[in-house]
Image (cartoon, rainbow, N blue to C red):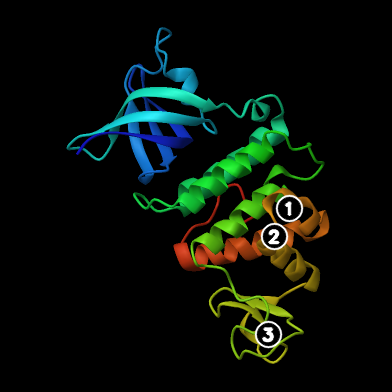
Amino acid sequence: MGAYETDAVVLRTIRYGEADAVLSVYTRERGRVSAIAKGARKSTSKLGGRLQPGVLVHLMLHEGRGDMATVRGAQMVRTHAGLWVEGYRLRAAGCVLETALRGLPEHEASDETFNLLVRTLDLLAEAPPRTTEPRLEPLVLGFAVKLLVVGGLLPRLGSCAACGVGPPLVGFSAQAGGALCPSCARMGEPLDPHVLDAYAGLVGRPLAEAADACPAGAAMGVERLVGLSLREHLGVTLRSATPV
């Protein structure tokens, strides 16, 4: 218990009572935490505009006896204003924030995860709108794939997860641990080689090159593989994604 300061990305804001707001934030110091901002929704409050989803803020928090910290102050670090002027970007950012909210455990800090989340929002705030669904935005998929890497949940992609044989790999099973060879493919579902290449590209290339790594034709397949892994290992099904 006590007070501390930390940089944080606001993942979700929920109205509470007449003027308060309950926040889910991902902090550099404590990982994902919940906090209440008392009076944040009052017209005279200096907090409200600084606590919108997707912003990077420096928070002053106090931990008491309850489950939630209390916000004592907030200083804006980056607004990510580009998200708010373009509907495509805003919806894509919503997919990223949902993945972080549901895929990251509470109170487990990770500099690598924090930097990945901030970097993704930085890039999305300047990303060109696409004609595809925002949930299939390469930066959204790149974030999810790299989050699996950071969490130690990356499926095996270079050889068969069941028997270890090398390519060709024609199937996928999150339960088995990744891609499957023709002999083991019956354990999973068919895998398009272009989807496998795109997934591997998102793993190996910088996030800024996500669009080059994952062409539009492979995006839905990559989304499905990510969804299978999230459901298998974390029990998570994202509302923003196609049902697995």
Looking at the image, residue 133 sits to the left or right of residue 145; the answer is right
Residue type (three-letter) at the residue carrying disc 1: Ala
Dividing the image into 4 quarters, which one contains the N terminus? top left
According to the picture, the residue beneath numbered tag 3 turns out to be 185
Of residue 206 and residue 159, the one placed in the foreground of this image is: 206
Q: Secondary structure at mark 3?
A: helix
- Position above or below: 136 against 18: below
Instruction: Decide if residue 203 is in sight here.
Output: yes
- Position above or below: 156 against 40: below
Residue neighbourhood size for the residue with mark 1, other residues' Cα within 10 Å, grouped as few (<14), some (14–19), many (≥20): many
- The reply to whether the C-beta atoms of the residues labelled 3 and 2 are less than 8 Å apart is no
- Label located before the other in sequence (3 or 1): 3
- Position above or below: 37 against 6: above
Quadrant of residue 59 within the rendered picture: top left
- The reply to whether the C-beta atoms of the residues labelled 1 and 2 are less than 8 Å apart is yes
According to the picture, the residue beneath numbered tag 1 turns out to be 210
Name which residue lies at 40% across and 7% down: 44
Looking at the image, residue 120 sits to the left or right of residue 128; the answer is left
The mark lying in front, picked from 3 and 2, is 2
State the residue lying farthest toward the top.
Answer: 44
**Image position, residue 188 (x, y; %):** 63, 79
Q: Secondary structure at mark 2?
A: helix
State the residue lying farthest toward the left.
Answer: 65
Dividing the image into 4 quarters, which one contains the C terminus? bottom right
Distance, label 3 to label 1, CA atoms, is 28 Å
The mark lying in front, picked from 3 and 1, is 1
According to the picture, the residue beneath numbered tag 2 turns out to be 202
Distance, label 1 to label 2, CA atoms, is 6 Å
Distance, label 3 to label 2, CA atoms, is 23 Å
Q: Secondary structure at mark 1?
A: helix
What number is the disc on residue 21? Answer: none
- Label located before the other in sequence (1 or 2): 2
